[in-house]
Image: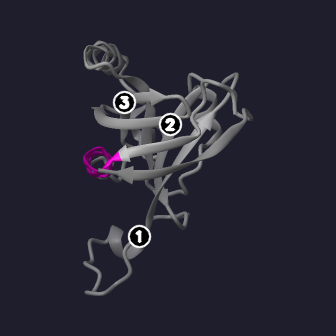
C-alpha cells in the first residue's frame, strides 16, 4: 500500500443509505455517483454521496455500462472543497453481475482511484422470464441479494490494471 492509497474505508450511515437508494433507483440500468469525504492517512471517510447521471452512449448499453456526466464532477469538486472535503472516487451498480470491476471499469477509470460497486451476489446471465412477463413473484420468493465492494484501482488505467479489494464499514 502506498502513502496515498486507502487502508480502510468508512461510510457514514446516511451516505450508505443514499448510495443504496440512488443506485437502486437507476435499476435496471447502471447507476453512478461520486463519493465525497475526508482522508486521514490510511483512513478514508465517505461523508456525502453526489448523485450523477449515467450518460453512457449509446443509451441502449446503460444496463451494462456507465459514464458520469463531467459537469457533475465540475460541480462536486468546489462544493466538497468548501467543506474541507474532496472527491474520493466514484460508485456504480452492476445490476446483473457481481461487484467486481469489469475490464471496461478498469480501463476507463482515472487511476489511481477508489471505486465502490453495488452488485449481485450471484450473477444473472439472462433476464428472468417470469419477471419480464410482469408476473409478481409469490410472497416469500427469494429476492436478489446485493453486496457492496470497495476497490482501489492502481497505476495506469488499463483493462488488465491491478485492483485491490478494500475493507469498509459503516459508521454513525
The prevailing secondary structure element of the residues shown in magenta is: helix
Please state if 2 lies on the left or on the right of 16 as rendered.
right
Q: Give the camera-side residue of 59 and 36.
A: 36
Placement of 167 over or under 42, stated as above or below: below
Q: Residue at x 56, y 22 (%)?
A: 110
Give the residue number, with chain letter if any, for mark 2: 43
Q: How far across and down, in percent of the image, does residue 161 sit?
A: 72, 32
Q: Nearer the viewer, residue 29 or 148?
A: 148
Dot 1 or dot 3: first in sequence order is: 3
Q: Could you tell me which secondary element the residue under label 2 belongs to?
A: strand
Circles 1, 2 touching at the beta carbon (< 8 Å): no
In this picture, is 148 found above or below 1?
below
Residue 152 is situated, as x and y percent measured from the top left of the image, at 60, 36
Mark 1 and mark 2 lie on one chain; the one further toward the N terminus is 2
Nearer-the-camera pick, 97 or 39: 39
CB atoms at circles 3 and 2 under 8 Å apart?
A: no
Q: Residues within 10 Å of mark 1 (few under 14, many from 20)?
A: few
The residue at which mark 1 appears reads as 144
> Which region shows up in magenta?
12-22
Q: Secondary structure at mark 1?
A: loop
Residue 69: which quarter of the image? top left
Q: Is residue 168 above or below residue 78?
A: below
Disc 3 element:
strand
Q: Which residue is mark 3?
A: 37
Q: Label 3 to label 2, Cα distance in Å?
A: 11 Å
Amino acid at each position: 500500500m502506498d502513502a496515498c492509497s486507502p487502508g480502510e474505508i468508512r461510510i457514514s450511515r446516511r451516505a450508505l443509505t443514499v448510495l443504496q437508494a440512488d443506485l437502486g433507483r437507476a435499476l435496471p440500468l447502471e447507476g453512478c455517483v461520486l463519493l465525497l469525504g475526508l482522508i486521514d492517512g490510511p483512513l478514508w471517510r465517505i461523508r456525502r454521496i453526489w448523485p450523477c447521471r449515467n450518460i453512457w452512449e449509446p443509451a441502449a448499453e446503460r444496463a451494462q455500462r456507465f459514464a458520469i456526466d463531467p459537469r457533475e464532477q465540475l460541480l462536486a469538486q468546489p462544493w466538497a472543497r468548501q467543506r474541507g472535503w474532496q472527491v474520493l472516487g466514484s460508485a456504480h451498480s452492476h445490476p446483473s453481475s457481481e461487484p467486481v470491476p469489469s475490464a471496461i471499469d478498469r480501463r476507463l477509470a482515472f487511476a489511481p482511484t477508489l471505486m465502490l460497486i453495488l452488485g449481485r451476489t450471484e450473477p444473472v446471465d439472462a433476464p428472468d422470464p417470469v419477471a419480464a412477463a410482469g408476473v409478481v413473484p409469490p410472497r416469500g420468493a427469494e429476492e436478489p441479494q446485493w453486496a457492496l465492494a470497495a476497490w482501489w484501482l492502481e497505476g495506469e488505467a488499463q483493462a488488465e490494471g491491478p485492483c485491490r479489494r478494500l475493507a469498509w464499514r459503516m459508521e454513525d
